[in-house]
Image: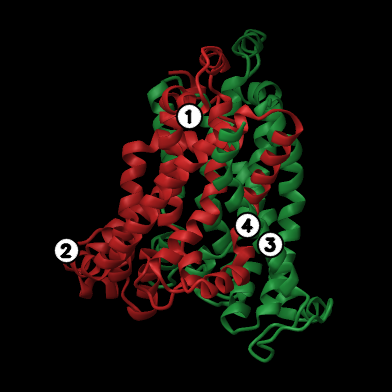
Chain colours: A green, B red
Amino acid sequence: MKTQLFFLIPALFFAGVLYYFMLWNVYISITNYSILHPRPQLVGLETFASLFSDPDFVSALARTLLWVVVLVAAGNLIAILVASAIYNIESLRARNAATAFFIYPLAVSLAASGIIWRWLFDPDRGIDAALGAKILWLQGDNAFWSAALVSVWVYAGLGVLFYLAMFYNVDRSQIESAYIDGAGTLSVMLRVVLPQSRQALIIATVFYTLFALQMFDLPYTMLFLNPFVSTLVIYTFFKFATLYFATASATAVVILALSAAIVIPYSMFGFRKWLRI
Amino acid sequence: MKARVVVSYLIIIAMGAVWAIPLYAMVVGSLKNLSEVMTSSVLSPPTAIDPSNLASAAGRLAVPLLNTAIVVIPVALAAAFVGAMGAYALMRLAGSIRDGLITGIAVATYLPYQVALVPLVDFMKTLGLYNTLPGLALAFSIFYIPFATLMMFIFMTALPRQVVEAAEIDGASDFTLFRSVVLPLMGPGYVSTAIFLTIQGWNNLFIPLVLTRGYGKHVMLTLFSFTGQTGNVYNQMYAAALIASLPPLLVFVALGRYFIRGLLALGTGGKA
């Protein structure tokens, strides 16, 4: 028992530091800590009140939530499409190679991806030139959709992996008998395989939501502090960099609350149930 | 070939081509010379191969690459080990205490680390570790050790329980059990966790951005610094992106199945 406690101390210590940071952050958010007030005083919810009356914050919040919707919807759709295609290939080696290939953007840094894509979206020398079109990917509001598209490119592979893992668990004999009954591939996927893979939908949605809520590196390296791609984390970072610490912390509390709404139920119920512990 | 196999291949080839474009553009772009980048599309292959961008980017990235390696790799290896210890202890605990601890660690792991921004920087300044490599290493440890504990615990739940129980009946101590029974079985899980954390730490821009000044202490900062300077020429930026991405990409190519197993563990448990 004592040895076990000793084994557990480092992990608990560092997890404790993380919780301490979160509480400390909540505390800063109810003070007026900034370059103007280097000695913080408690001001209650004043910082939050001014936060929600700042149109830059409100638009960053709305944009982040829209990003969640786009990444969850497009990420799941593409993941289902690609995973279904991979699932229906007969060669195991081809399946594994294709799966690994769609994962590779996750091994490339978001900073490198941002840099690559900002040139692919260049109006004169990017994919516009190849398409012979003038889409102006990074102009105004287009920038948000382009950056969101890039995030789908980055993360869709993770969903492919989750869906495939669930597809492989589906009982083969059910699929065989559906084929014998004369069902086509599409209806087998839609009626037999996908309904038994709801867990992948939940997990991918949880992860995509979290990735969208913490979106920073990608828009920041693509377009720096461009208002059209400003997210909550970019807003936090900007307030921090300009020494408005309480405002930065209050924004972090908003991100924390949004994430906790996903993470806490996931950790308490879904995740533990699937581990069967 | 059956129709569904043909259609499947067509979907994979079409989507795969889109997925490959950035990698392709980065490689060919990094090899173009100055006059070519001013006029040619990022998608057109170079007419002449010019390795000088790669050489100059490698020169500027050499020290940051080294700084990143000496921070990220030891932290990843150590965090995975500490995580294995914690996971073993959690495995041996029972009941609601364990369930509570695991939920607590999972919540800490999955919440976005960016929300700790202001306290993290204050903390490092108080310790005198702001703008230092040990400070970066400590910050990565704070985030990665709970993460590694969770990941190793997931892998451990997939171990056959009888092995541990049999050794326990033999009267082995926790140290012996951990060293001679659990650790050898946890090899693949350890590799997965260490690789996952290495790639995460290598590719992290946010933590070095807020914890250091200048652009030299982490490779992602140096890569980011290229975007501000080279203005209208993408060959330099692509060369820097290629060199900065090469270590994680090579790890992914060589040990990708461990990385993938790590991702799967986080999402679906360790049994896949």
Residue A84 picture location, percent across and down: 56, 30
Q: What numbered label is drawn on residue A22?
A: 3
Side (left or right) of A30 relative to A38: right
Mark 3 vs mark 4, CA separation in Å: 6 Å
Dot in front, 1 or 2: 1
The quadrant holding residue B137 is bottom left
Answer whether residue A236 is visible to the viewer in this image.
yes
Q: Numbered disc 4: what chain? A: A
The quadrant holding residue B17 is top left
Dot 1, crowdedness within 10 Å: few (<14), some or many (≥20)?
some
Q: Quadrant of the N terminus of chain B?
A: top left
Residue B123 picture location, percent across and down: 57, 70
Mark 1 vs mark 2, CA separation in Å: 53 Å
Tell me the amino acid under the disc marked 4. Answer: Leu
Question: Furthest residue to the bottom?
Answer: A36
* Circles 4 and 2 on the same subunit: no
Tell me the amino acid under the disc marked 1. Answer: Phe
Q: Quadrant of the C terminus of chain B?
A: top right
Identified at 78% across, 79% down, the residue is: A47
In the picture of the structure, the residue carrying the numbered disc 4 is A18
Closer to us: B27 or B120: B120
Residues at badges 1 and 3 in contact (C-beta under 8 Å)?
no
Identified at 59% across, 31% down, the residue is: B269
Residue B242 picture location, percent across and down: 31, 59
Q: What numbered label is drawn on residue B138?
A: none
Residues at badges 3 and 4 in contact (C-beta under 8 Å)?
yes
Identified at 21% across, 64% down, the residue is: B54
